[in-house]
Amino acid sequence: MARTDHSFPAGSGSPAAAPAALRGRGAVTNVRHRFQRDDRVQVDDGWSASGLPADFVESVPDFASEFTGSLSPENASGTPAGARVIPILPDSRLAPPALKTTVTAEEARKMLSRNESPDIPFDVAVNPYRGCEHGCVYCYARPTHSYLGLSPGLDFETRLVAKANAVQALRAELSRPGYKPSPINIGSATDAYQPIEREWRLTRGLLELMLETRHPVTIVTKNALVARDLDLLAALAEQKLVVVYMSITSLDAGMARTLEPRAAAPWRRLETVRSLTDAGVPVGVLVAPVIPFINDESMEHILQESKAAGAHYASYTVLRLPWEVKTLFEDWLNAHFPDRAQRVLHRIEDLRNGRRNDPNFGSRKRGTGIWADLLRQRFAVATRKLGLNRHRLALDCDHFQPPLGPNATASLFAASVSGASSAPMPSSSDFLSPVGAQASSGVPFSDGLPAVGGAVGRGARQLRAMAAGQLSLFD
């Protein structure tokens, strides 16, 4: 596969003054978020010609004698006495230091986030982190940082929040009377295996809880770090309790470095797919998102290599640009691909009924129109030839064992719950980091959606979608 050349100078396209790309970061600026009340505007105060800020003007000490036109040993530079000069010194402030990742811990009141969207193939999600260091410029979860008063731009990938009590909070929710298990998705907002998971280990703690309670779980990630927990994943897979979805956007390392700078390299993700499959863990692959004229030509190649690595399922989504992501993505295009920026944006409009973003259920994931139909046909042909999505994996929800609550004590009733955990609760110091997840697949609906809500409504909607051939086996 030929490497994509995207070494165009930043700002050389339209608009002419595009922000410059930052090494190791996806966003090129801290875009103003929708809840922000104050605006900051740069103003030229007259010092721009010197290239130095006003406070860099320094005084030259008075000399013993007034300047008379002749140079003395003390005034060898020829500078008049008492004059003020602008020294020719490098200004470090013209090149700001590289942004560092910071993590703030928080106490979560609850972990389970319930979903009734008809085009999301899971009911419940857990996100142990806010923000994601992977820096994927297209991430639809970026606008969630606005609720914290932070920018969905660089703040989203540098100022992270960790739910330090994620495992304890989820344990309390699973132990509530009347709780009914449904596969929990880890990775619905930000990636649970982003780099800070190496130290915080929150995702591993969640998997240990899933194994303890025999609770079904799905994982979406684009980081090879998921292979660290192969022991837990293999044990869960033996009981039909887990499926891992690996998101692969491109097989071009240079392109991946630009799109998702701190995620695992494409070849590492394929190796992870192979490692998980060899251990008996069912693996699916997400070609997500598909971006016109950026990575859309790679769909068949990604599916082919994923199948060779052992993947059994596959799905795709089309680029979404909700809220501030639209501005961030346009800035990114003008910084990295100024030659094709307008072409990409116009094709996105073709996929979104003339708009940059389509929030409607049923079309937001796959798009509409002739180009969306072409993508759908390409995907269907490729998966059929490769033998992907031939069967649907059903996770086991019948052997769930409620854990003891954080304040529960052993009783005669506890004995009736076989396998209930009697181990002491881990302290908050055992898990000291935020948790998040990323990526999701969608289910397209061509007609209107039924008004039925809740679990029954979801089942009815999915049955209708399967009957119409709109719900893939993977989804």
Image (spheres, helix red, strand yellow):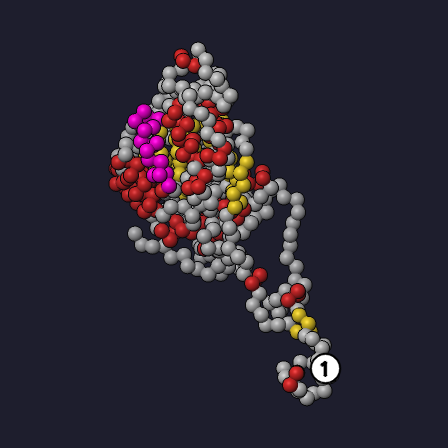
Q: Position of residue 187 (x, y in %)?
A: 43, 35
Q: Which residue is mark 1?
A: 64
Residue farthest to the bottom?
70
87 to 299, vertically: above or below: below
The reply to whether residue 419 is visible in this rendering is yes
199 w.r.t. 74: above or below:
above
Quadrant containing the C terminus is: top left
Percent across and percent down for residue 1 are 30, 52
Across and down, in percent, residue 300 comes to: 31, 43
Q: Nearer the viewer, residue 208 or 242?
A: 208
Q: Is residue 238 magenta?
A: yes
Q: Main secondary structure of the magenta part?
A: helix
Q: On screen, 209 above or below 153?
A: above
In the rendered view, would you say 340 is above or below 398? below
Mark 1: which secondary structure? loop
**Which residue appears at 42% of the width and 41% of the height?**
198
Q: Residues within 10 Å of mark 1 (few under 14, many from 20)?
A: few
Residue 85 at what x, y percent from top left? 66, 74
Give the residues drawn in magenta, as a range: 225-241
